[in-house]
């Protein structure tokens, strides 16, 4: 389960300091593992390794055995409990592979078919459910809108408001369309995996927790792993989730009991047992046909391959196949990566929302596989800052629009530095590292911004994460609007799909939005009749036959084309 989708990016900070090996917390598993500290690996976690902050558990696996495992930081700050490899973490969307495995097991038993439609399981759903298949839900090609984003747009937060699976099922049933025709695009959706979990329950007659215990965790002796469908359930050795504040940390947990898209609790030690099963399968019929299925990526309706399999991403890293999945929700971050050709895996489980386990896991792999991996691409190595004076930085400042995901970005020069500005409260420094290239500081993945220049200035801005293209932005001139210009947009707008009203008012030269009793938010003019809010997305106001404002269409990451109608 991922944190609610927002156009703004969370600012993270990783500080690498010198390490005292005595600070690293260890705990022996059932089979004793003797190991000496690995200073190069421990240095990767130096910023997490102290008794005043939460941190991470690390497990490094080769040929089905640990070669290194260690805890860094604290599992519980209130009780002064250190993290160990037995600490149990919520692993958020890393859970999806377990839900997908449950689907694969039921398909193997011919209890369901991957081309079954959603309508067969939810006959009251709108007509679009006739075109959505189980396979599309598995591969995130269904187009079903993401429920976490929908709930947030309806005024319900991740860790503040309680709602149920039944509420979500009804919410999805009110959606009048999908984000795109099913099967035509890839767009990550937590809704798909929540629905898959519900299909497991309908077909098996057991809860997802019960089915997975009987058919996966029990057979693999994963004694500390379960789907957490009751937030009052006591979990031995549980690590608490935390989020950073200006003066320390606050508890960051959720009361949601929703499973399928997330909500697995597990430990590094249990993930060793899960990892082994990808080489010597003990589930279902017991052969590797099941493993081949869950690690084979899907395709779009036009035959185009995607990189998402059954709750797992399959791509390449430094010349070798990499199978992985990460997760982020409330105060937890997780990543598990596997190099099947090298029989090598890394699991990183963290209990702080500013952790970057994807980067940490790859740094660990870089160390252990230094002789096996291809050299890092030259552009990845060129991260040494270069000097640019303030005058030269100004040519990169401006407003930029990403049409595919429908959100804006801004870069601004302040105090002699270039910043990516997501909102008044959230910004990341852009440090120059080459010709028109900048590294975005404080991101969970290695993030590079490249400016393509023309004689007139910036032609486009391209965003890369871990070397993968993540969006291309084009410059635009922001519209200036006064109170008189804004007056025609004010009104009360209603979404029957969310069953919520958005109240839009004008104050001075500001267009303001309020949802329920939440804080008032600014809607900033962009161009034409389009406005934006960094937390909610892009608002495209629509005019009726007489030319007046009749509605607006909201684009918010994993929710597209959500229409709000202006009330008389």
Image: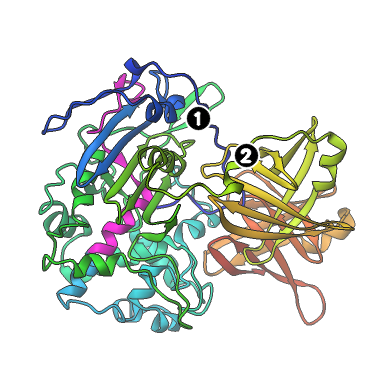
Q: Image quadrant for the C terminus? A: bottom right
Task: Give the x, y percent position of residue 106.
Answer: 19, 71
Examine the rendering and report whether any part of residue 568 can be seen. Answer: no
In the image, residue 78 lies in the stretch drawn in magenta: yes
Task: Give the x, y percent position of residue 508.
Answer: 84, 47
Q: Which residues are magenta?
A: 73-101
Task: Give the x, y percent position of residue 182.
Answer: 46, 78
Question: In the drawing, what numbered circle is on residue 244?
Answer: 1
Q: Nearer the viewer, mark 2 or mark 1?
A: 2
Quarter of the image holding residue 495?
bottom right
Looking at the image, how many numbered discs can be counted on the residues? 2
The residue drawn where x is 61% and y is 65% is 494
Q: Nearer the viewer, residue 28 or 7?
A: 28
Q: Which residue is mark 2?
A: 383
Question: In the drawing, what numbered circle is on residue 367?
Answer: none
The kind of secondary structure element at disc 2 is loop
The kind of secondary structure element at disc 1 is strand
Report the side of 361 relative to 400 (left or right).
left
Q: Are marks 2 and 1 in contact (CB under 8 Å)?
A: no
The residue drawn where x is 46% and y is 56% is 148
């Amino acid at each position: 389960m991922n944190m609610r989708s927002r156009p703004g990016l969370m600012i993270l900070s990783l500080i690498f300091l010198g390490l005292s090996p005595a600070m690293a917390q260890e705990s022996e598993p059932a089979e004793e593992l003797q190991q000496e500290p690995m200073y190069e690996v421990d240095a990767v976690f130096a910023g997490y390794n102290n008794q005043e902050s939460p941190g991470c558990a690390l497990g490094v696996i080769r040929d089905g055995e640990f070669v290194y495992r260690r805890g860094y930081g604290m599992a519980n700050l209130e009780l002064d409990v250190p993290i160990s490899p037995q600490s149990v973490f919520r692993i958020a969307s890393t859970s999806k592979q377990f839900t997908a495995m449950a689907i694969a097991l039921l398909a193997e038993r011919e209890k369901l078919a991957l081309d079954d439609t959603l309508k067969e399981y939810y006959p009251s759903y709108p007509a679009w459910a006739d075109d959505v298949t189980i396979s599309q839900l598995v591969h995130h090609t269904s187009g079903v809108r993401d429920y976490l984003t929908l709930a947030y747009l309806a005024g319900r937060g991740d860790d503040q408001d309680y709602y149920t699976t039944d509420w979500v099922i009804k919410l999805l049933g009110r959606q009048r369309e999908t984000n795109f025709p099913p099967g035509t695009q890839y767009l990550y959706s937590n809704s798909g995996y929540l629905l898959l979990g519900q299909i497991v329950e309908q077909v098996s007659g057991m809860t997802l927790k019960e089915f997975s215990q009987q058919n996966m965790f029990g057979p693999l002796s994963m004694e500390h792993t379960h789907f957490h469908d009751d937030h009052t359930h006591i979990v031995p050795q549980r690590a608490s989730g935390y989020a950073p504040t200006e003066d320390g940390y606050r508890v960051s947990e959720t009361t949601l009991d929703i499973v399928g898209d997330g909500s697995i609790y597990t430990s590094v030690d249990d993930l060793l047992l899960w990892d082994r099963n990808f080489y010597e399968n003990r589930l279902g019929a017991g052969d590797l046909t099941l493993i081949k299925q869950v690690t084979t990526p899907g395709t779009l309706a036009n035959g185009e391959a995607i990189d998402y399999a059954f709750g797992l991403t399959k791509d390449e890293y430094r010349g070798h196949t990499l199978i992985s999945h990460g997760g982020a929700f409330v105060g937890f971050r997780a990543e598990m990566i596997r190099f099947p050709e090298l029989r090598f895996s890394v699991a990183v489980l963290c209990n702080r929302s500013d952790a970057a386990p994807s980067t940490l896991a790859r740094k660990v792999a870089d160390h252990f596989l230094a002789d096996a991996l291809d050299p890092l691409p030259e552009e990845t190595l060129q991260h040494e800052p270069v000097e640019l004076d303030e005058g030269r930085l100004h040519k990169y400042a401006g407003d930029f629009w990403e049409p595919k995901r429908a959100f804006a970005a801004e870069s601004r020069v302040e105090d002699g530095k270039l910043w990516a500005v997501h909102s008044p409260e959230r910004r990341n420094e852009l440090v120059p590292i080459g010709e028109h290239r900048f590294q975005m500081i404080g991101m969970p993945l290695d993030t590079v911004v490249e400016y393509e220049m023309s004689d007139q200035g910036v032609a486009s801005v391209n965003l890369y994460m871990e070397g993968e293209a993540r969006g291309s932005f084009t410059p635009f001139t922001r519209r200036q609007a006064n109170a008189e210009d804004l007056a025609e947009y004010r009104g009360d707008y209603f979404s029957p799909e969310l069953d919520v009203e958005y109240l839009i008012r004008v104050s001075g030269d500001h267009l303001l939005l309020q949802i329920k009793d939440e804080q008032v938010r600014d809607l900033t003019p962009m161009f034409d009749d389009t406005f934006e809010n960094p937390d909610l997305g892009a608002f495209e106001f629509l005019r009726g036959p007489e030319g007046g404002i009749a509605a607006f269409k909201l684009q918010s990451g994993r929710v597209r084309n959500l229409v709000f109608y202006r009330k008389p």
